Image (cartoon, grey):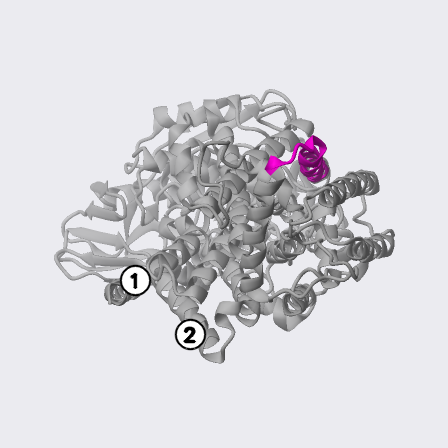
Amino acid sequence: MPPVAETVLDEVEAEGGEDAGPGPRTGAPARRGARAAGAAALLTAVLFCLATALSRSHPFGPVTRNVVDLGQQYLPYHAYWRSFLRGETHGDAFLNWNSGFGANFLGDVGTYLSSPVDLLVVFFPADRIELALYVVTAVKITAAGAAMAALLLRLRPGPWPVAAALGTAYALSGWTFNFGSTVPMWLDGLAAFPLLCLVGEWARTGRRPVLGPLVVALAWIANFYTAYMATLGAAVVLAVRLLTAEETATVRRRLAGALRAARSVLVGVGLAAPLVAVVFLGTKTADPTPEVTFAPAAWTDVLARFLPATASTASPALFIGTPALLLALTLPFNRAVAPRVRAALTAAVVLVTLSLQWEPTHLLWHAGASPNGVPYRQAFVLCGLLLIAAWFSVAGGVPRPAALLAGGALLGGLAWAARGSVDIDRWTFPASGAAVLLALIAALLALAAARREPSGAVGGNHRDSTGTAPEAPTGDNRENSTATARQDSARTALKAPARPARLLPVLAVLLLVAAQAGEAAVTGKRIEEQQRAEVAWSPRTGPWHEAAAREVARADAWPRHRTDPGEVPGGNDVLLVGGQGADHYSSLTSETTSRTLVSLGFGAYAKGRHPVTLDNPVTDALFSVGTRMRSEPAEPVRQDAPPRATVTATTVPVPPLVTVRPSARPAGPSGDSAFARQERLLGASVYELPAPRRTGRALAAHCPAGSEVWFWAPEYRGTATLAGQRPVRFDGKPPAVSAAMGALGTVPASGEVRIALDPEGRARLPREPVGCLVRARLDTAVDRLTATGATRVRTTGHTVTAALPPGSTGVAVLAVPRISGWSCAAGDADLRPARAYEGLVAVPLDGRADTVHCSFRPPGLRLGGAVGAAALLALAATGVLHRRRSRG
């Protein structure tokens, strides 16, 4: 961009204002940075909302945005976060009583909710939680655009409107639309990358030794997973700057800058340790997902992802806008940029691109574990590097025609090579072609404006009488001298009456912004539409959820017994509507919780990390579920309307939350079926377990008349139908989905049980797939456990205290999965790590204690607190030393 463009768009002081003499104005760089950040934030917000509106998605249309985990995890967690912040939950920061019959909440906070932006949900009413999450998402994306725009101007002076446009391009990259906007916690890493690059700049120049670690700590607290990737990316940018900037031209200065950066990172991560350690140890005890072997995407698909309107979870989302990509591709050929800057930045972009496709570096980007699902979560770093390259190529002026032609040739070759990719959309090439056309017109206008500049002007495209670029200093000295000359030429240009010379650069910038904006809006629209058509989705929250929440609030009797909201569309039901059910979908779902519940007949999704409710009277007795909600949908669930249903509550007698068993070894029938495990944990035989005869697609057995037939086959996918009853659907699909135990009907007077199977594929059945529940036996077992169980139970945020009948012996069992972090004691004894009774929390009794007390503390909290305290001392020492040096 020619200097006059920056002058006109920067609104230099009017005649009679500040001193018009040579040299930069006081505070001008800071004002340009603020303008760039503000403009990028505004443009980003407008375009993100426009893309949502064009796709007819909520809140600007009737269609749900709740695809995959956005509806299953992030929406419910933000709903619970709002309730927690307003003091409306039974749990505290340590323990979530609502999910998974008791879950480590601090770990989930560090995984999903620890960003400061997430606090915004507290300002929205409960029935507007989708709008709250959309605002949180938009604010994070907007912050990323503003941070990148400010960083660009810090790396090299240049026209702030162009920096704003490139900041918006970063915030609205393909990674944002394809991954980030539906996984809001990753967006904190998007904003962290430019901020951590800024920390690297401070470390390189010996500035802000206290603020730097605080920024690192904020990034790692907000989301340590993507902050780790952003830190690696910032290290790449810092390495480029240390090798190319004039202030660090000596080995000693480079080493000092690198050490200061390392100190900032170490202290910052240490400050975040109280939360990071809890999350890290939580992942160690989480239900393990199947190992993933990384398979690099085809290069045709990788190249296609640089283009607009492409979507896929199997290849990296690298779209940054065709004009921005064109500018980045001109960098290797732009002789106006110092050679070592060109070489270093180009090498960084190429090496990072290759690192996406090589397994060792793929594992490095993902902290040693190839992730399930999206394998290119670090792609936002490459998007940022490309935009930094684009900025260095354009900050001093529009690249010369030769560089534009070379970059255009590379872009054309990229598009040609990608033409056969399955990721190419019908909108891809029309959108890209229109953006290229607008960008070329903008470049021609800018070049025309440059030719009209006064002869004294010095710009990125200035040539001497021989037609070659003049000698110029390299590194930051060269940039500073160019910036100073630009200010001089700008003031000279203002005195010239050539009005077109002032309008052409304005038009050029407007066309550049229009090209970037149009592509971003089209890309966002198409990606949302493709995701809704191709992946799982959840409906919008509405009357069904509201009716369930009202019934739960009316019936809630915690801790006398639990209230399970039953099945509500969207998953993680209890976080949305309240209650204390089994539903829990988290990356940190404990292996103990998952395996205990699945072994008892509960269903699970997401390879075990999402156990779901089970409407079974035996498990209700085991987990003290006294009130259960059942919903009858009023209509099929649709994408474009909130669902409606009739919700009813049923309350039955159940044992208390704490019961007493005769010994530490469960009594009951042997066997590994869910029916046998339920009986061992209950301490009574309540099922008849026939040995069914299998003939083709039918099972035949004999059970007591009037008993209830239950079918259990966690790997079965299809329907099972008891003679004379309606078919019941089972959705087993190992290893991702375990089908829940299901009721088929009542045994007729003849006692004959005939079950017709209609499997999808091979019917995989366990050795004991059928159990016939005799209700009278269950009632007797419930009465016995109630009579010998706790007479009073009191809970606080993360503790349970129960009063027991005098002389109780054996073992007290708390109806909570024995996840890491539970400590218990009987009577006045000291707390010790809790024991386990068939997967539940247990406390041995000797007949002398008439109370038991249990408390939960997230694993890693003590270690993280110690590291955080040490980091705080190191930060204080750093601040004191820096202040003394400054005074000296």
Q: Is residue 602 visible?
A: no
Query: In the visual, does 758 lie left or right of 850?
Result: right
The three-letter code of the residue at mark 2 reads Ala
Query: In the visual, does 593 lie left or right of 541?
Result: left
**Most foreground residue, 348 or 758:** 348
Could you tell me residue 12's position as x and y percent?
Answer: 52, 37
Residue topped by disc 1: 868
Mark 1 vs 2, N-terminal side:
2
Label the magenta part by its dominant secondary structure: helix
**Most foreground residue, 773 or 827:** 827
Most extreme residue toward the bottom is 251
Residue 509 among those drawn in magenta: yes
Instruction: Look at the numbered disc 1 and give the secondary structure of its residue.
Output: helix
Instruction: Name the image quarter holding residue 531.
Output: top right
**Most foreground residue, 460 or 779:** 460
Query: In the visual, does 702 lie left or right of 629?
Result: right
